[in-house]
Amino acid sequence: QDPALFSITYYLTQADADLGGFNQLPLPLVNTTNPQQIFVRIENVNNSSCYDTTSFNLTVFDSPVANNPGDIEYCDDDDDGDDTNGQSTTDLSNVTPLVLNGQDPTLFSVSYHSSQTDAETGTAALALSYYNTIPDQQTIWVRIENNNNTDCYDITSFELIINRVPEAFNSELFQCDEDGNPDGFTLFNLTEANGELTGGFDDRITKFYPSLADAENDTNEIDGNSYSNIVNPEIIYVRVINSITGCFRISELTLDVTATDSTDTFLSLCDDDGVEDGIQTFTLSDASAAITANITETVLLKYYASYEDALLEINDLPDSYMNTNPYNQILFVRVENDNACYGISELQLVVYGLPQIETEEERIYCLNYYPETITLDSGLLSGAELDYTYSWSTGEMTQEIEVNEAGTYTVIVTNADGCSKERTINVLPSNIATFESISVVDASTNNSITVNVSGEGDYEYALDESGGPYQDSNFFDNVAPGLHTVYVRDKNGCGIVEKIVSVIGFPKFFTPNGDSYHDFWQVYGVGSSFQTNSTIYIFDRYGKLLKQVNPNGPGWDGTFNGSKMPSNDYWFVVTLEDGRVFSSHFALKR
C-alpha cells in the first residue's frame, strides 16, 4: 500500500487501537514484557474513519557472546602415522566451554568453520573431530547462535596450533668401575649424553626416569647430575622436551659400567721458584704417556681435583695447574674415547723441597798465614752429609774443601730427589798490619801518638795493653811521657803487631829518700833503645854543673861529690840524639 496514503500507529490494547489517537506507543519502543502483544492501527490519512487493526507478538531473544578462547595448542601425535607433520585430529568440543564461558549450553549452540563467511552464514560446519588441513597452525572460526532464533549469533576465531614432536635419539654412557670394588656399579652424570639425546638442538631439554611409565607420566624423575646405576647395564628413559612448545619424545639412555685400563702415575717438581712453600705450576699433560701406557687407542684425558668431578665430568682443570695442597696432592684423570671410559687414574703431584743450607756466607783468609788453608763447607742445616751430593766451583765433589786464596766459591748441593740449591761463599782477604810510621808529639802538656799502618785488614789500636781496650782511631792523646807499646790488631783475627814508642818528658820533682819512689831524676823516654846518645846536664841555681846523667842509667841521685844536695830548684839542659834541645828546672825535695 502507498505509505503516502496511510499512517500506522501502535498500541498496547485493542481498544486503544480502535479509538486511535490515544495512548499511542512512542517509537522506538522499549518492551515491558517478553513476549509482549502489540496492536497496530492503519488508517487513511485523509479519513481516519477508514482504518483497520491487527496485532503481533514482540519477542526478544538472548544474543550470545563468542568469547575468544585464545590459541589452542596440541602436540602432534602419530595417529596419522607421522608425529612430525604438524597435523592431528583435534576434538573441537573441548574448545566449546571456552567459547561459552559460562553461557547456557542448552540455549546456545557452538559450531566451527574454516572461514569467516561460513561462520557468518552458519554453513559448512566442521566436524568436532577435526583433522587440520593446514599443517602447524590454522585459523578456526567459531559461530555461537541462539537455539530459538539463529539470527541471534556472534562469531570469533582462534589459532589451532599442532606442535611437532621433537626428534630424540637413543644414547649410551660408559663409566669406569673406579670405586675399588669391581661390582659394576658407579656414579654417572647423565647430562653428559644430552648432546646425543637431543641431536644437538639448543631448544631441547632432558628429564630422566627409571621406567617408561614414569617418563610418560612425568613421575619419579631422576637427578641427572648424579646417578648411581642399580643394574649393569641399565636403561634410563629420557624425555627430550622442546623447551618452547613443551612437546616431548621419549628416548633410551643405556648405562654401561666398564673395567679400567689406565695407569696411576705422578709428576714431580723441585720447589725452586724462589718461594719455598710447596706450591708449583705443573703441566698436567706431561703425565699423558705414563697414564695411557696400556692403551692403544687414541684417547682424551681430562684432569679433575676430585674423584666425583672425574666421574661426573665437571670442573675439569687446565693443563697448566698450580697445586693447592702444598708438597703433595692427588688429582684424578679421566681417560675416555667417544665417552667410553678407559679409567680414572690417580695423578700424584709432588713438590720436592730443596736442601736446607745457608746460601750466603763471608769468610776471611789471612794472607799472612799462607799457605795455611781454611775449610769451606756446604752449609747444611739439616740432614746427613751422605744424603747429598756436592759440586764446587773448584771441581771438588766433597762436603768440605780447603782453600788458601781469597775469592768467590760456590757449591751446588743436591738432595736425593734431585733438587738443588746453590751456596756462595765470599772469601775476603785480610792481613796483619804493617807499620808505616808513628808520629809522636812529646815534651808537651798534651803528648800524643799517631800510628800509621798499611795492609788488607781492618785494624784497631791499643796502647800498652795487648788485651786492650782497643779503639778504631789510630790517634792517642794525653799520653804520659815514657816508653809505650803500641798494639795494632786485625779485626778479622789475622794477628797483632806491636811497637815500642818513646814519649819524651821531664819530671817536675824527685825525692831521693831511699823509699824507691822518685829516688832518681831522669829524662822520661830515653834509654838503651831510644835517644841513647843524648846528653843530660844538671846545674844548681847558680849555673854550677853538678852532674852529667847517663841516658842509659837510672839518673841523678841528688848528690854532688858524695854529698847530698839540699832541697832546692835545679836546672837541666838536655840535648837529644835527634838534635832537639830542652832546658828547664825541677825541684829536689828531702
Image (spheres, rainbow, N blue to C red):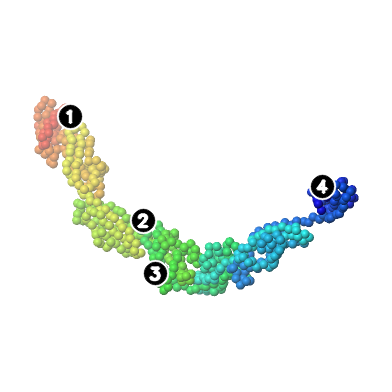
Secondary element under disc 3, as helix, strand or loop, is: helix
Q: CA distance from mark 3 to mark 2?
A: 29 Å
- The mark that comes first in sequence, 3 or 2, is 2
Where disc 4 sits, the SS reads loop
Considering only vertical position in the picture, is 451 above or below 582?
A: below
Q: Amino acid at mark 3?
A: Ala
Identify the amino acid type marked 1. Answer: Ala
Q: Which residue is mark 2?
A: 274
Q: Residue at x 57, y 70 (%)?
A: 251
Q: Secondary structure at mark 1?
A: strand
- Looking at the picture, which amino acid does disc 4 mark? Pro
Choose mark 1 or mark 3, whichever is in front: 3
- Mark 3 or mark 4, which is nearer to you? 4
Circle number at residue 587: 1
How far separated are the C-alphas under marks 4 and 1? 172 Å
Q: Is residue 158 visible?
A: yes
Question: Which badge, 2 or 4, is on the more N-terminal residue?
Answer: 4
What residue is at 34 percent from the left and 64 percent from the top? 418
| Above or below, comparing residue 577 to residue 44 in the picture | above
In the image, which is nearer the foreground, mark 3 or mark 2?
3
Closer to the eye: label 2 or 1:
2
Q: Which residue is mark 4?
A: 26
Circle 2 or circle 4, nearest the eye: 4
